[in-house]
Image (cartoon, grey):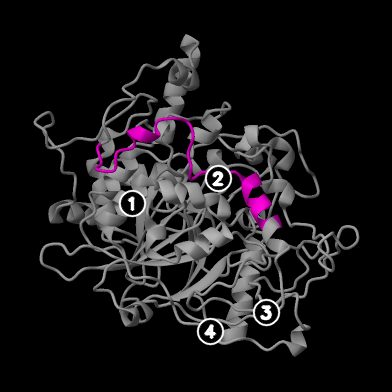
Amino acid sequence: MKVAVEGCCHGELDKIYESISYLENKEGVKVDLLLCCGDFQAVRNEGDMKCMAVPAKYRHMQTFYKYYSGEKKAPVLTIFIGGNHEASNHLQELPYGGWVAPNIYYLGYAGIVRFKGVRIGGLSGIFKSHDYKKGHFEYPPYGPDSLRSVYHIRNIDVFKLKQIKMPIDIFMTHDWPRGIYHYGNTNQLLRQKKFLRQEVECGTLGSPAAAELLDHLQPTYWFSAHLHVKFAALMQHEAKNNAAPKITKFLSLDKCLPHRDFLQIVEVADRPGSSEHLEYDPEWLAILKATDSLQKPSCNFWNPPQDNGLYTRWDFSASDEAMMEVVSDLSGDLCIPENFSLTVPAYDPSCPQPNAHPVYSTNPQTTELCATLGLTDIYILAGQAYGEECATGATGEEEDEDSTGSVDEPSEYPTDTSGLSSSYNPDEITIEDEWVEEEDEEVECTEGKGTDAVVPEGQVGSQDSDRDSSPQREMANRLILPSTCSAPESEAPLRSLRPLSLPPPLASLSQGSSEEEGGLTPARVPKRTSGETTLGSASHTGSTPQIKRRNQSIYTAVENEESED
């Protein structure tokens, strides 16, 4: 089946679906599924924007509300994970996943589902060592700290995912697994994003928890975003149990802007005879049931059970009996019910309410799933704990600040995170740094350097523009377009696609196998000739005008508000 993979969404659903439709018409293909790798921004109304970790003056309503209200319906089944720019009060309603709009499904804090027999998993949020061992204690209204800690991944969710034994086809995280950059064109990455060099050289770029999951799950595909750059890698794992070593194809994509590599179609082998509907995964649901009692809405540190003599149980993997019990709980029907319903009023452009306060609500989907499987709604637990703290005059954030928790406790994973116990997260890059990088790259635009565009011309956002004149990417099956600095579109022919040229991680991995395993569908898209207006006259770079960046106001923030340092 054809799977469209998208990087950072940033609420631009109209643009993404327009781009998919354009590719389908241009290439004569039909996309079966869209996967979004975080920063989805499922903002339903003005109140939700106040629960999103961007400065208030940069909060803008994008286009998700149209799909939430029913004004529009997603033309293709969409599955997404959370990132670090989300309406957290909305996503917290669905800790185990659920529909945020018709045909748009959120995987929850962590989750695995099936579509056409393909197992798709994901982990929401980004890694932050000082919050990693805490429970999901956050509850709105958020304070300055919890507004950000709410989207930091927790070891309880990683522990659940590490109970998976059956093969995973696709896995998604927002930030990259630590060390994955060694399996692709690292030099090219650093030419495009110079400010990542220190983290790459020090080995601190990326999530150590995601690296643990990559080693454990060894999925066929791993998709990420967060760093706003396209990067492909091919990782051959060490052989286990005398089986042939598995290979994971990694792909990270950019954010949704013109002339950026934010969308790519991947051919994934489905399983004939499988359901055409989105389905629950029995193994995952059995693990959720087994680990339900481990969940605590506390900001105190928690370590998962280990085989060290201190726990009566440490293996929570799903047995055949447990999976059959789940199927029985669901009356033999694994299809995820299409039971979406509005839980708060949708944004009304004809009656804006900029002073609206966030609305907090439980979600009937979560209530129904918990009742069916005997799970605990951890959002309700967090609300109860928050109420008790408010009654005693202490909030979760105050407890966190005053806590003398075991910060020196060793990590439960071989990748020890104790060395990253400060508040600085090298993977959570500041947006300002990226804009500076891109400004430097723009002045380097010369004859013959291509730009990557996948957004077709349309009425929506026609006043917006962005471009990326970064060095030519020698990745497989990329979208290659004529340079904006060269001849007009009608005179500039499309260049041929170049083969994948990634250094194999192991000597046994040949160049031929890397091309064969690529599995990426090539697509050629004409350059977008938008009608954006430039600001001012030509800049000091000569004929290169200063271009107004689309949504710059949303993602550019003062460092002390956004960087989390």
Q: Position of residue 56 (x, y in %)?
A: 70, 36
* Residue ID at (13%, 37%): 313
Residue that numbered label 2 is attached to: 429
Instruction: Choose the circle earlier in sequence order: 4 or 1.
Output: 1
Q: Amino acid at mark 1?
A: Ala
Secondary structure of the residue carrying tag 1 is helix
* Residue ID at (60%, 38%): 53
Marks 2 and 3: which is nearer the front?
Answer: 3
Secondary structure of the residue carrying tag 4 is loop
| Residue 219 figure quarter | bottom left
Q: Amino acid at mark 4?
A: Leu
Secondary structure of the residue carrying tag 3 is loop
Q: Position of residue 41 (x, y in %)?
A: 59, 49
Q: Is residue 186 magenta?
A: no
- For the residues labelled 2 and 3, the Cα–Cα distance comes to 30 Å
Residue that numbered label 4 is attached to: 497
- For the residues labelled 3 and 1, the Cα–Cα distance comes to 37 Å
Residue that numbered label 3 is attached to: 448
| Residue 403 figure quarter | top left
Please report the bounds of the magenta region as a residue range: 412-439
Instruction: Indicate the quadrant containing the N terminus: top left, top right, bottom left or bottom right.
Output: bottom left
Instruction: Indicate the quadrant containing the C terminus: top left, top right, bottom left or bottom right.
Output: top right
Instruction: Choose the circle earlier in sequence order: 1 or 2.
Output: 1
Is the residue 59 above or below the residue 164 in the image?
above
Q: Is disc 2 in contact with disc 3, using a CB cutoff of under 8 Å?
A: no
